[in-house]
Amino acid sequence: MGIIAGPCCLLVSWPTPHPALSLQERVPRAFSSRLALALSENGIPFFAPMRYPFAHGGVFATAWAGSAEHRHAAGGGRAGCAARRRRRALAARLGHDRHGCDHRRDRAAADLSGGAVLHGDCRRHHTPGTGGHGRRQRPRLNPAGRRRMQLTLRQIEVFRALMRCRTVVGAARDLRIAQPTVTKTIRRVEDICAFALFDRHGGRLVPTADAHRLLGEVDLAFEQLEGALARALRISRADGGSLRLGASPSVGRVLVPLAAADLLQEHPGLSLHLDVLSVSQVMDYLLSGQGECAITLFPILHAGIRSIFIAKAAVVAVAPHGWLPSGDGLVSPSVLTDRPLVVFEPQSVHGRAVDAVLEAGGFRPTRTHVTRFAETAIGFAEAGVGVAIVDAFSALSADRAKVAVVRLDHAPLYEVYLHRQVERARSRLIQRFEGALRAQAVKLGA
């Protein structure tokens, strides 16, 4: 039998015939009681035998660990450092690691340094997420103190179905899943969102105000997702893909369709999607990625959008026959003095052009009619309401049987631009379409 004593622990070892014997068979109770009594009589506050011993080879050993106060007192100063070095040296001789774990034999072990009970798999120190031996790492939390969780597409789909059907049975039938699955999914969504989604009244589910707000955000995201999937499907088709672009009404009536026709001659399998946009819609249209480009009569000053100059457009007057001098020459703006004019809002592109023409002519009209779009102004002129001052590209759509189009003696005030998103790659189709726009602008002579 061997006894190794330290300031805060005592190790007793002796040969054992079989390593599978129980603790009661290995350590006689009489010996344990007498040893504990002897230690107490020698001034050691309290020693208790550890519950599990450990075995190495043919030697069985058990440890007695002192009280917390005694271990704390023994662990400080030079004596404590020497005791720790002796315990580490003993563990190294027995084939254990720094935590007292016997990885070679995978047997039960005891930590000599602190009396902590360990097992062969070292579960106290080798735990998932700790990165080996050491302190357990806490799960990553968000600023609110909860674990980061996100809604899945399946959970959102179940929520939308339940908002649409208002019953668990209807949502399960619509999605072709079991009713308990719908219930569990909705509860999971409520746990993640941290608010109630439905109130039950008379066997039906009544959505809360938070549920309606969540549905608005979810529907918007799903619309964008469905649009992206549809565009991806068109691109993957074998007929040449698709091209989506936007245009303001002035250039979207004649110039853009003619340029698109030239592009389709080179790519007969191409599918086009043209969106007619107002001034306030163009920037969001480009930044959201709905279309690859947009064509307007004004530049866009934005860091994420590049405006490419295409051509200039002259200022023309569209009036009923007999209101203006006939001929192919330029007409002075002063001839419009006694005629009612169709004008635009002051801050619009056409409104600024009309103001420049009136300032150059040195007069103010006696009567005006206000509209928003150049196409409407041309319609007023065709109806005999007044004279419309618009760009030459818009005037191409005028009915020459009803009105006359006369170019005014004024410098061109309109410029055509092609806009595209800076972070979006410039495709070959956009390059071809840009060339077709320039060619048509020259051909039309606007």
Image (cartoon, grey):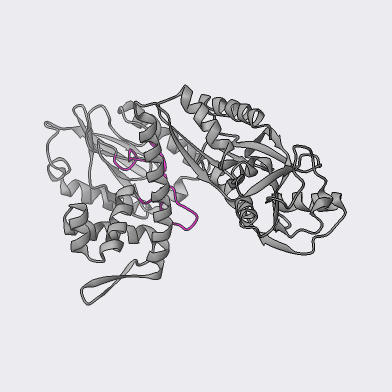
Residue placed furthest toward the bottom? 202
Q: Is residue 413 left or right of residue 12?
A: right
Residue 307: horizontal and vertical position, in percent?
Answer: 66, 36
Q: Is residue 27 left or right of residue 112?
A: left
| Quarter residue 286 falls in | top right
Q: Where the N terminus falls, by quadrant?
A: top left
Residue occupying the point 37% across, 45% down: 226
Range of the magenta residues? 123-151
Residue placed furthest toward the right? 362
Q: Is 313 located above or below residue 427 in the figure? A: below
Residue occupying the point 57% across, 34% down: 423
Residue 363: horizontal and vertical position, in percent?
Answer: 85, 57
Q: Where the C terminus falls, by quadrant?
A: top right
Q: Is 346 located above or below residue 428 in the figure? A: below
Q: Is 325 in front, or is 54?
A: 325
Q: Is 164 located above or below residue 93 in the figure? A: below
Numbered circles on residues, count: 0
Residue 149: horizontal and vertical position, in percent?
Answer: 39, 51
Work out whether residue 136 can be spotted.
no
Q: Is residue 96 left or right of residue 383?
A: left
Q: Main secondary structure of the magenta part?
A: loop
Would residue 203 be counted in the magenta stretch? no
Would residue 150 be counted in the magenta stretch? yes
Residue 244: horizontal and vertical position, in percent?
Answer: 48, 37
Q: Is 13 in front, or is 418?
A: 418
